[in-house]
Amino acid sequence: MQRGHFPLSALPIWCILNDISFVDVEVADINGRGLGLIAERDLINEEDNVEIPTLLTVPQDLVLSAEGVEEYARENKYFRQLLHAAGRQSVRGDILLFLLAQLVLSSPDYTGGQGATTPWSQYFNLLPAQVPVPTMWSEAERSYLRGTSLESAVTAKLSQLAKEFSDLRTKTEDIPYWYQLLSIDELITDRDWVLLDALYRSRSLGLPRSGDSMVPCLDLANHSSDANAYFEEDSKREVALLLRKGSKISRGDEITINYGQDKSAAEMLFSYGFIDTQVTAKKLILPLEPMDDDPLGKAKLHVFGSTPILEIKDDEGVIQWSGPFVYLMCLNEEDGLDFKVLQETNGSRHLKMHWQGVDITGTPQTVQELIKGHDLQQVFQLRVVTIISDMVDQQLEKINSTNHPIDSIPGPVRAEVLHVASRLRLVESDLLERARHVLDDQKTKLFSDASVLAYLKSMESTQGEEDVVNEDEDFC
Ligand SMILES: C[S@@+](CC[C@H](N)C(=O)[O-])C[C@H]1O[C@@H](n2cnc3c(N)ncnc32)[C@H](O)[C@@H]1O
């Protein structure tokens, strides 16, 4: 759907009308970062200042939160119908529906009845039509993510978005207003849904009282790892941008906040469309799947409950990994892992997981702890390290073999996409290389452990006996 226009010059009046106050700060175009906030004069906040200078305040009724969405549903009949049919499953989903309604109300393509507009209907037009996150990249551009941890994450996200949009169309088939827009005129497309998701991901923040929210004007603050400002929500749910203690800002300097110092390069790129070259947590997240030939694989996944992942990180120069599901992956019935179906008196059935006879259904993340002290602890550990080491090898092979643009899908690729994708490859391949060395060391140590050697020897002799039996059988 075509976007309406809201000139930056109209923002000060919109702010006055909506009780949003900027203090010594203005909005400006920042080279390569879209809009941002800059200081209108020199600003200082000494370390011993009692009163912290406020740079921006946004009243509660402008904060787009779960509560704000419900409030709007009370005022606007068309939105109420939409929310009732397709919403109330997650805060994100409801905010996306709210943004969808604002997209319609503010678009020059739309000629229908207005219903109740909100300040957001105008503000929405100030939001960018393009967000540099990979879900908005072309297919050719996305092919530059091959071999990185974002390859599968972006594919999965795009499938999720396609499904959400198709469900939305199905659920609104009985509402003439939305059916017309979504299914007959097709004024709103899946591209719009991808944009709304990108806007939410790159601009929402967690507030202590209002929860996940979008805050107009505060969402114009760009990121810096050396941020000079931060935000707070007070007891009246008013949100303020405040100057950090010790900050000295010259007139014209940018006011920035920190989007999260624990975010990895992949997370920054996925959520915001850029990578902070100064500091980004050096970590990598890969999806875990049960082994193809594991008869208990599905049961393990079911009891585990959440999406299993492997996290590899550089913790102040030390490579560490964690992946509680890997411990489940490498344990089996003969080790003492067991599943049972429990039938309740009311007829309901539950899958239960036991380790050495003890019910551990509620604590599937603790297997690493539970195997401690077991005779075969080091054998289990070796299996775990081998699985992770194989994953790291495979990922490295993928990331290195797709280093050349020859593997990419043909089509124009923006220079900034090329730059950020190669930065991600570099960060991730470096981390994987270092993880490979650590895992190799761990494997070597485990292979020389007395209990592992004894186990391998016993396996060899069992194998030998089996071979003799098999040979005998062959002779029969
Ligand atoms: C919350 S918005 C900030 C306002 C935004 N610049 C705008 O024009 O509306 C977040 C987006 O700003 C951009 N951005 C923020 N900080 C950045 C940075 N340090 N480097 C590059 N882009 C940045 C990214 O596009 C990101 O998705």
Image (cartoon, rainbow, N blue to C red):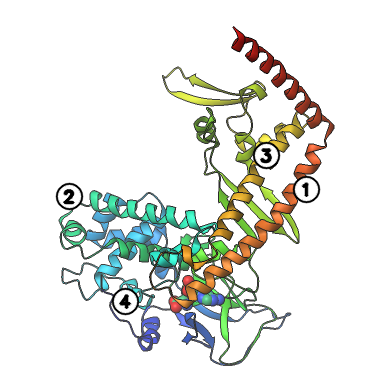
User: Would you name the residue on which mark 2 appears?
Assistant: 174
| Circle nearer the N terminus (3, 4) | 4
Percent coordinates x, y for residue 255 in the rendering: 56, 82
Mark seen at residue 122: 4
Tag nearer the camera, 4 or 2: 2
| Amino acid identity at mark 3 | Val
Task: Please say if the residues under marks 3 and 4 sit with CB atoms less than 8 Å apart.
Answer: no
Percent coordinates x, y for residue 223 in the rendering: 56, 74
Q: Residues within 10 Å of mark 1 (few under 14, many from 20)?
A: few
Tag nearer the camera, 3 or 4: 3
Is 443 left or right of 391, judged from the image as shown? right
**3D distance between C-alphas at marks 2 and 3:** 52 Å
Mark seen at residue 441: 1
**3D distance between C-alphas at marks 1 and 2:** 62 Å
| Circle nearer the N terminus (1, 3) | 3
| Circle nearer the N terminus (2, 3) | 2
Mark seen at residue 252: none
| Circle nearer the N terminus (4, 2) | 4
Mark seen at residue 384: 3
Q: Is residue 384 above or below residue 339?
A: below
| Amino acid identity at mark 2 | Asp
| Amino acid identity at mark 1 | Asp
Residue located farthest toward the top when viewing the structure as drawn: 476
Is 446 left or right of 72, judged from the image as shown? right
